[in-house]
Amino acid sequence: MVPPPPAASDAPQLPHRRRDGSAAAGSPAPRPPSGASFALGASGRLLPLSVPLRFFGAAAVFHGFAWIALGLGAAQVPRFAGGIGWPLTSLHATTLGVLAMSAIGASLQLMPVATRQSLGAPRVVGALWWLYAPGVAALVAGMAAQRPSWVAIAALPVIAALVLYGGLLARNLAGARGMAGVRAMGWIALLSLTMAVACAAAMTATWVGWAAWPRQGLLMVHLVFALFGFMGALALGLSNILVPMFALGPVPAERTQLGIAALVAAALALVLPVAFGLWPPAMLLLSVAVALAAAWWHLASMRRVMRAGMRRALGGSFVLVRIGWGGLIATLTLGAWWALDGTRAGLSTAVVACALALWLLSFLFGILQRIVPFLVSMHLAGTRRRAPTPSSLTDERALTLHRRCHAAALALLALAIALDSAAAAIAASAVGCIGALGFVGFLLTAWRRTRRPREAQAPGPAPGVR
């Protein structure tokens, strides 16, 4: 259901103000904001519905393609250590096509809601999709065909789109008031995206012979700042909006949010000396320890939000969210193991797969299962006397199919890496594809059901006219 506006007794009580703006004596202290407050007045800051759904729809298509590419490269997946081909295609279809695609659509819609100022550029966001989605498609096609020159050319529109996205988000963050913790995570994500894109461009230049850079250092910075910096910071920052909104619970204190953001920034900074050979690999344990502290603090704050929330039954979507939270701890634990024994076969693949599939994909799809019906319901609120509820816009059978197949595919992928089994990787690909079709079905159902309210309000024939 759409979070209802808080009752008068539950609404945040602002202190009475004198004409000069100061608080009147004896006025009550402001209460911490609740998740329900995000929905108040948000309709004026929403992008056209087709814009975020366009990004989410493209992510669903790339999700299916990523599983197909993984199956086609099954023989190399369990011990993949780099190089152009199907495993790299699957990796970038997931990172750029699913994770970043969804992150762009979600953040450009949710950040204006959190910062309480309109993005003011729906046409630019629409143009951003037309630049980014075909660019990613061409990029992964070049990787699949093993054509470095294609990859270099396709990287240009992708980089241009990410720069445009960064500019839009930076403009919104720079003019924002309040939500200091979310803004801090947003800036960390943007800086990390800059680092990841710069390293990707440098590595692409070495592929086509334009330059020669230290590949291993660039690769580590690219992976860490893309997965943990850009996607990780966005996931943690937007959780401070989404979890309170869906659980109808209190927003974590700004001091908590800023403390977690500081730990995330410190953990990322500590990776750089290791990546470029200034510190030995074992010093990566220091970065992992700081990241684990940030993760546990964040999860503790989310647990408090959910315990204090008015809505306790959060459905199957939060099963995936909790799996993703567990995946975050598992990824950092594997990262600590890799810092101590970086030569063990399959361990680096396990770290990347755990970060991508168990943590980020599980969390992303759990959140999207709530975001999509919520956004559709808010957009349709003015088309009828009674707005459709998110549950009425949701195909639960399709989502159940997706959740079960996602969990099974993760288990099979873990087995493939542990046993160096191409057969298990092929099985993971097949099951993952079925789950991806289930998620596509969920999106199509939500989109089809948006038409009903519009058809209901269309003018009918005049009385007496047949």
Image: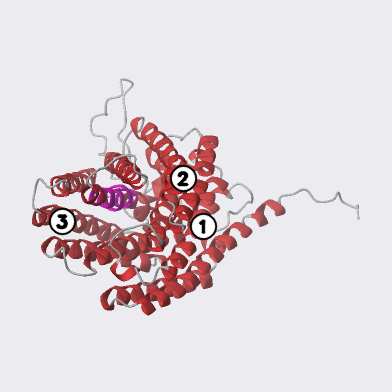
Direction from residue 339 to residue 186 in the image, left or right: right
In the picture of the structure, the residue carrying the numbered disc 2 is 154
The foreground one among 303 and 59 is 59
Direction from residue 12 to residue 464 in the image, left or right: right
> Who comes first in sequence, dot 3 or dot 1?
3
Residue 401 percent coordinates (x, y): 48, 74
Amino acid type, mark 2 = Ala
For marks 3 and 1, give the CA distance: 36 Å
Residue 453 percent coordinates (x, y): 66, 54
For marks 2 and 3, give the CA distance: 34 Å
Q: Nearer the viewer, mark 3 or mark 1?
A: 3
The foreground one among 389 and 9 is 389
- Residue 411 vs 234, above or below: the answer is below
Q: Is residue 142 magenta?
A: no
- Residue that appears at 36% across and 30% down: 175
Q: Are marks 3 and 1 in contact (CB under 8 Å)?
A: no
In the picture of the structure, the residue carrying the numbered disc 3 is 288
Residue 147 percent coordinates (x, y): 44, 52
In the picture of the structure, the residue carrying the numbered disc 1 is 373
The foreground one among 285 and 386 is 285
- Work out whether residue 40 can be spotted: no
The quadrant in which residue 248 appears is bottom left
Q: Which type of secondary structure does the marked residue at label 3 adopt?
A: helix
Residue 297 percent coordinates (x, y): 19, 55
Q: Which type of secondary structure does the marked residue at label 2 adopt?
A: helix
Predominant secondary structure, magenta span: helix
Q: Is residue 230 magenta?
A: yes
- Residue that appears at 68% across and 51% down: 454
Disc number for residue 19? none
Start-end of magenta stretch: 220-238
- Work out whether residue 401 can be spotted: yes
